Image: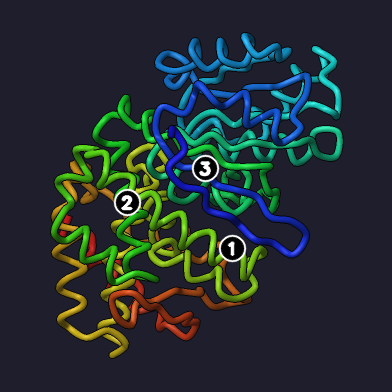
Amino acid sequence: MPIRKQINVNLKDRTYPVYLGEAMHSIFSDVCRQHSISDPVVVITDRNVANFHLKLFKKSLIDAGFQLFTFEIPAGETQKNIKRVHTLITEMLEKRIPRSATVLAFGGGVIGDLTGFVASIYQRGVRLVQIPTTLLAQIDSAIGGKVGINHPLGKNMIGAFYQPLFVWSDIDYLKTLPVREIICGIGEVVKYGIIRSAELFEFLESTLDKVMELDKESILFVVEQCSKIKAEVVSQDERESGLRMILNCGHTIGHGFESAGNYKLLKHGEAILLGLVAESYIASKMGLLDNDAFERILALVNKVPVKVKISSLKINKIFSAISRDKKRTLKKSRFALPVKIGDVKIVEDVDEKLIQEAIKYTIRRG
């Protein structure tokens, strides 16, 4: 069977499935019908995904009798802006796409975030399906309903919680990813091991090479474990009022690195790896994380072959971005700091000098 696993996100209002498997395109239209999707269907994707996958994907829908509208945009984080949202909505209105449409986010994290936000505001909201094509999106961003765009003053500052009808995670899409995109996904996988699963962390310690090579059973295990954790956390805390904050481990400082590089030097997953190092350093210095666990985190991060040089990044620019982070409460930055492999603690009272020290430490490590 193409579908190997179904993982449910159980919310107060409804439940939706995350379908995980391989070579699933042949049954996608059937699953759409099962979810009462009717005409028209709107596909929003980027040119990279379109070059590899759009032809076959469109054919499966057209052969099933769906009326289809397709919008292709350039690839990259810089597309997550209000101008692109306005352009897409204008094009949809010009084509008279009705409120009864279903929008398919066919791509990685950028497409998922952007398309989800468009779906959430187009004619006060249309149905959404997330079809993640990157490792990072399959294990993290496509699940949970966070959608949004960036603002010049911060990442994901404009957005909403908008849940999809379902998530369609086909690992066959990962085969066309460049190595750097796989590395980006690994950054989030490491995070999941740190926050919730010592088993997953240990699996990465022993099997990272196979995951990097997209060994089928290894990658299915990783995507399944991360998806289960994300679904469990979101089911308990959809709107990030409590437990869901643990998913931000590595992100408070990671977003600072990402912003300091103008969202061009570092990809999201690479920045998260840096954030995990810095925030683990803070946890270690605060006495929350023992040295053995800290060294294990550093050793695993070291095994991920990130090639980006960060020595040019300015500490004050990173720190300034952290101070604007949306996870702040009044004057304090909020961190999900590791206390052991598989568990974190939400902490707000982190000394600013220690944050700067952690940034310096991370930059020195390269």
Mark 3 secondary-structure assignment: strand
Q: Is residue 129 above or below residue 346?
A: above
The numbered disc on residue 221 is 2
Q: Earlier in the sequence, mark 2 or mark 1?
A: 2
Taking the spot 69% from the left edge, 14% from the top edge, the residue there is 69
The numbered disc on residue 234 is 1
Neighbours of disc 2 within 10 Å: few (<14), some (14-19), many (20+): some
Front one among 66 and 145: 66
Q: Is residue 47 above or below residue 339?
A: above
Q: Position of residue 167 (x, y in %)?
A: 57, 41
Q: Position of residue 66 (x, y in %)?
A: 71, 15
Taking the spot 19% from the left edge, 50% from the top edge, the residue there is 304
Front one among 64 and 58: 64
The answer to whether residue 364 is seen in the rendering is: no
The numbered disc on residue 267 is none
Q: Which residue is mark 3?
A: 19
* Quarter of the rendering occupied by the N terminus: top left
**Picture quadrant where residue 39 is located:** top right
The answer to whether residue 163 is seen in the rendering is: yes
Front one among 216 and 343: 216
Q: Earlier in the sequence, mark 1 or mark 3?
A: 3
Q: How many marks?
A: 3
Taking the spot 42% from the left edge, 38% from the top edge, the residue there is 21
Mark 2 secondary-structure assignment: helix
Neighbours of disc 3 within 10 Å: few (<14), some (14-19), many (20+): many
Decide if residue 77 is on the left or right side of residue 69: left
* Tag nearer the camera, 2 or 1: 2
Amino acid carrying mark 3 in the image: Tyr
